[in-house]
Amino acid sequence: MKHPLFKLRRATLLALVLTLSAIPGLMFSTAAASAQQLTIKPVAEKKVKQLPAGPLFWTIEIFPLLAQAQAGAGATGLAAEVSGKAWLFTLGPKGAPSAGANRVAEIGPVPLVTAPEYLLRINHAGGPPGVKTPVHTHPGSEAFYVLAGRLGQRTPHGVTYADASQSMNGHGPDTPMVVFSDGMTDLDQLVMFVVDATKPFSSPANMP
């Protein structure tokens, strides 16, 4: 008959072996997520010579049809179809909702840049938990609206988060940042930019 202490040691050793055998897979999963980057797809953009006067906000609206969103787009409005919905993104002062539209968010005041020409761009971006962008800057500002998952953004000002159906305002031009998927499910987000059109849209950077 085996001594009880021998049985205890054998059970402990077996548990340790099982734990260690699981670590390489966990390490591989973590490393794979770290090696990936967010998927980014531009869905609309336009260049303008002038922005509206005063404090500006990104207004996000949903229309029944894309044609209606396109018809409602003014000089600083961009219409796009994303995830089966017709969206209108307008950079301008606060105002009443567009006729026939459902207002989703109003983000701002947006940090602005002075430029001879401006690029307005809408990106559809996302990825599984753990993916992130390299440290980078933009010659302007970006704002976010989260469709699903959890968004994180690290800048020299700290780390901020936004969950599904929440928005996040951006920082001023040339702010170093890392954007990452922080939730338990895939991040799905819309990103709105107003930048200096005469400069590179994105540049590598170092985080102070």
Image (cartoon, rainbow, N blue to C red):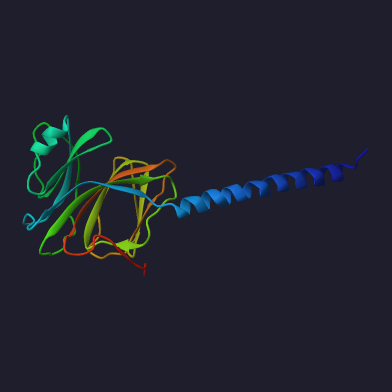
Q: Residue furthest bottom?
A: 208
Q: How many marks?
A: 0
Foreground of the two, 15 or 63:
63
Q: Does residue 26 show up?
A: yes
Percent of width and height locating residue 90 = 14, 46
Asked if residue 122 is positioned above or below residue 117 in the image, the reply reads: above
Lateral position of residue 79 relative to residue 179, left or right: left
Residue at image x 16%, y 60%?
197
In this view, the residue farthest toward the top is: 64
* Vertical relation: 200 (above or below) 22: below
Q: Is residue 101 visible?
A: no
Left or right of residue 115, residue 148 in this image: right
Which quadrant of the structure image shows residue 165?
Answer: top left
> Going by the picture, which residue comes out furthest to the right?
1
Q: Is residue 106 left or right of residue 24?
A: left
Residue 116 at x, y percent in the picture: 10, 64
The residue under the point 12% across, 38% down is: 70
Rendered residue at 16%/56% (across/down) = 119
Query: Which residue: 21% across, 53% down?
Result: 193
Q: Position of residue 1 (x, y in %)?
A: 93, 37
Q: Quadrant of the C terminus?
A: bottom left
Quarter of the image where one finds residue 96: top left
